[in-house]
Image (cartoon, helix red, strand yellow):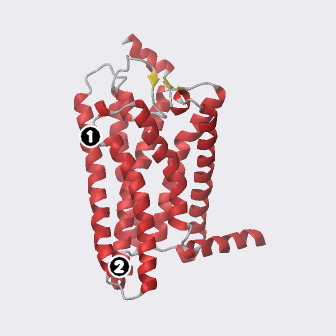
Amino acid sequence: MELYNSTLESGFILVGILTDSGSPGLLCTTISVLYTLALTSNGLLFLVITMDARLHVPMYLLLSQLSLMDLMLTSVVIPKMLVDYLRGENAISFEGCALQMFLVLTLGGAEDLLLAFMAYDRYVAICNPLNYMVLMRLRVCCLMIATPWTLAFLNSVMHTSCTMHFPFCMTREIRHLFCEIPPLLKLACADTSRYEFMVYVSGSVFLMPSLAAVLASYTFVLAAVLHMSSGEGRQKALFTCSSHLTVVGMYYGAAMFMYVQPISHHSPQQDNILSVFYIVLTPALNPLICSLRNKEVMGAFRRVLGRFSLI
C-alpha cells in the first residue's frame, strides 16, 4: 500500500521510444516534422471545411470531424513527449496520466466509429444517390457526428476508471510513449486477468462491428462502381473510396494489434512502433490522402486563402 500511495504522489515515468532509440535526436526531429505536418494539414482542412459553405455537406462535415479528432489526438501526446525529451525529464503525475489515457481513448474510439459512418456515407452516395439528401439529411448527419463522441466518451470513462483503480506497486516506469491500458496493467500488483479479458472484449466490440460495416459498405460500393457507364464517374468514385480505405487500413491495423491482441503478447518495442503509427503518422497522412487530389477541397482552400489575402 505504501508503494501504491507513493505512485499517487509521485506519478509515473514515461520511458518511450525516444529514450530507447539509438538515434534519439534524429527520431525527435522526424516526429517534430510529422507533428507539424499533422497540426498544419488537419488544422487547415478543418478551417477550410468550416468556413466554405459549399463544403457543408455530409461527406465533408464528417471529414472535418476526422481532422479535428486527429488534430486533438496527436496534440495530447506529442508536445509533452518532445518537451520531456528536450528537458531530460519524463515524469507524469498520476492525474496527468489518467487524463492522457482518457483523452486518447475518447479520441481513438470516436475515430473508429466515425470511419464506419464515413463508409456508410459513401455507400449511400454511390449506391443510392437519388435518396442521398433524404438518407443523409442534417438531423442524421448531426447524429452521426454526436454518436462517436458520446459512445467513445462513455467507453473512455469506464476504462480509465478501471485501469487507474488498480494498485501500481511494480515500478513507476511505463515503457511506452504515453499512458495506455496495456503497459499500465503490467505495472499493477493485483490480478488483472478479468479486466484484461474485458479490455479484449470491449476492444473487439468497438472495432469489429465498425470494420465489418466499412468492409460491407465498400463491397457494395465496388460492385456499384464496376457497373457505372461513365468512366469519369467511375474514376472519381474509386479515388474517393480508395483514399478512405487507405485511412481505414492504417487506423484499424494499428488499433487491432493494440487492443484486440492479448496483453501478454505485447512488447514495449512493438507497442511504441504501433503508437507512433496511429498517434503521429496516421494523423499526418490522413488530410493529404483525403484532400490533396480532391478538386472541391483544393478549390475551397483557394477561396478561403483569397478571403484572408483580401483582409
Q: Can residue 258 be seen in this view?
A: yes
x, y percent for residue 8: 45, 21
Q: Which residue is drawn at 43% across and 40% down?
A: 102
x, y percent for residue 252: 36, 52
Left or right: 56, with 262 as reference point: right
Q: Residue at x 54, y 30 (%)?
A: 21
Looking at the image, residue 169 lies above or below residue 61:
above
Q: Quadrant of residue 299?
A: bottom right
Looking at the image, residue 22 lies above or below residue 121:
above
Pointer 2 residue? 225
Q: Nearer the viewer, residue 233 or 50?
A: 233
x, y percent for residue 141: 40, 69
Seen from this angle, which residue lies furthest right? 310
Q: Which mark is residue 283?
A: none
Pointer 1 residue? 200
The local secondary structure at tag 1 comes to helix
